[in-house]
Image (cartoon, grey):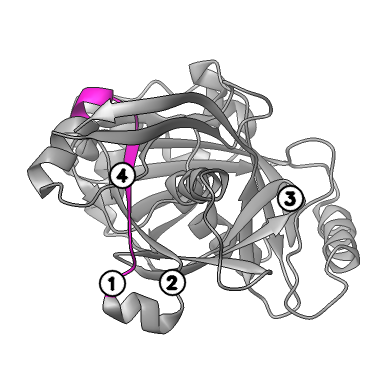
Amino acid sequence: MKVRAFKQVDVFGAGPYLGNALAVVLDGTDLLDEEMQHFARWTNLSETTYLLPPSEAGAVGGADYRVRIFTPGAELPFAGHPTLGSCHAWLQAGGRPRTDREVVQECETGLIRIRRDGTRLAFAAPKLVRSNPDAQLLARVTAALGLKARQVRSAQLLDNGPVWLGLLLDGRESVLQLRPDHLALKNLGQKVGVVAVEDTGSTALLIARSNREARAFAPRAGETALACLDAPQVEVRAFAAPVGVDEDPVTGSLNASLAQWLIADGIAPAAYIAAQGACLGRAGRVHIGQDEGAQIWVGGDSVTCVEGTVNL
C-alpha cells in the first residue's frame, strides 16, 4: 500500500451533494485490476476512477491523461459523470492540458474531448450505435419495470461503450412512478434507461426555440451548444443492476446516447436540460447541446466535496 491523493466529487448536481458522487484516486499507477475493483466495491459509489499517464498510443493521439472506471461490480469502457468528475479533479490537482480549448481523456472506448464552458465541463458524446431491441427482451424488461405496452412510445438499444436499452415513455409521471424489480433486471443482464420529453402542446415551437438558442450560444463552428433554458425539459432514470447499481443518480453516458437518438429523430430539441435523480432525493441537471457540426456535447457542474489521501 501507499498513500495516494484522493477526491470525492459531486457531478451533474444543481448544487453540492445533489448530483452523482464520484471517487477519484489521482494516482492509479501500480494498482492491480483486482485492487481497483475491490476499492470500487468498498466505496459503494456508482463509479470510482483511477487516473494514470496516457498510454503510448493515447499520448500520440493527444491524450492528457488516462482513466479507468469501475462500478462496484465491473469496469466500464466509458461513463459520463466519471469523465467530467475525473477531469475536474485532474485540473484542480494542477493538470495542464496540451491545448487551451480542450482536455483529451483516454479511456477504454478511446479518446474523449472535454471542453470548458466557464466553470462547466462538457464532453463530446462518443459515437453511438443504435438498433431495434429484440422483442422478447423488450417484453421482459417492460414487465420488470411494471410498464404497460401503451406507455412505451419507442425503444432503442444504445451503444456508446456501455450498452443501454432506452425506453421513451409517454410522460414524466410514467418515468417517476416506476418501481422496478431490480433482481429481475439483474437477471436479464441489461441496463435500462427511461426517458420522457416534455409535451408542451407545441413540440415544434419548443424545438425551434431551442435550436435558435443552440445556434446563439455556438457563435463559432465547433463550439459547444449547451442549453440556456431555465428548467428541465426531459426526465431520465437509469437502472443498472447488472453492474451493481440498482438506480444511478445521474448518468452521463446514458444521457449522451439518449440525446443522440432523440435529437436525430426530431423528438427532442437541439439544446435542452435533462433532470435525473429525483426519486433518489437528488437534483441532477445534464446540459445537452448540439453544435454546428452536429456533435452532441454533454455538460454539467462538478464540485469537490471531500479531499485527502487514501491508502491503496
Residue 188 % position (x, y)? 17, 42
Q: Distance between the residues labelled 2 and 4?
A: 29 Å
Q: Distance between the residues labelled 4 and 3?
A: 24 Å
Q: Which residue is drawn at 67% across and 76% down?
A: 294
Circle 3: element type: strand
- Residue highlighted by disc 4: 191
Pointers 4 and 1 in contact (C-beta within 8 Å): no
Residue 75 x/y as whole percent: 22, 49
Residues at badges 2 and 3 in contact (C-beta under 8 Å)? no
Give me the residue at 28% from left, 72% from top: 55
Circle nearer the N terminus (4, 1): 1
- Asked whether residue 187 is in view, the answer is no
Q: Which sits earlier in the primary sequence, circle 2 or circle 4?
A: 2
Instruction: Report the amino acid beneath label 3.
Output: Tyr
Which type of secondary structure does the marked residue at label 2 adopt? loop
- Does 25 lie within the magenta span? no
Element assignment for label 1: loop
Give the crowd class for mark 2: few <14, some 14-19, many >=20 residues within 10 Å. many
Q: Residue 286 carries which label?
A: none
Residue 170 percent across, percent down from the top left: 59, 40
Query: Alpha carbon of mark 1 to alpha carbon of mark 2: how far?
Result: 8 Å
Looking at the rendered structure, the kind of residue marked 2 is: Ala
Q: Which mark is residue 55?
A: 1
Q: Name the residue under label 2.
A: 63
Residue interval drawn in magenta: 41-55
**Residue drawn at point x = 60 percent, y = 26 percent:** 173
Hey, which quadrant is residue 196 in on the image?
Answer: top right
Q: Is residue 229 visible?
A: yes
For marks 3 and 1, give the CA distance: 35 Å
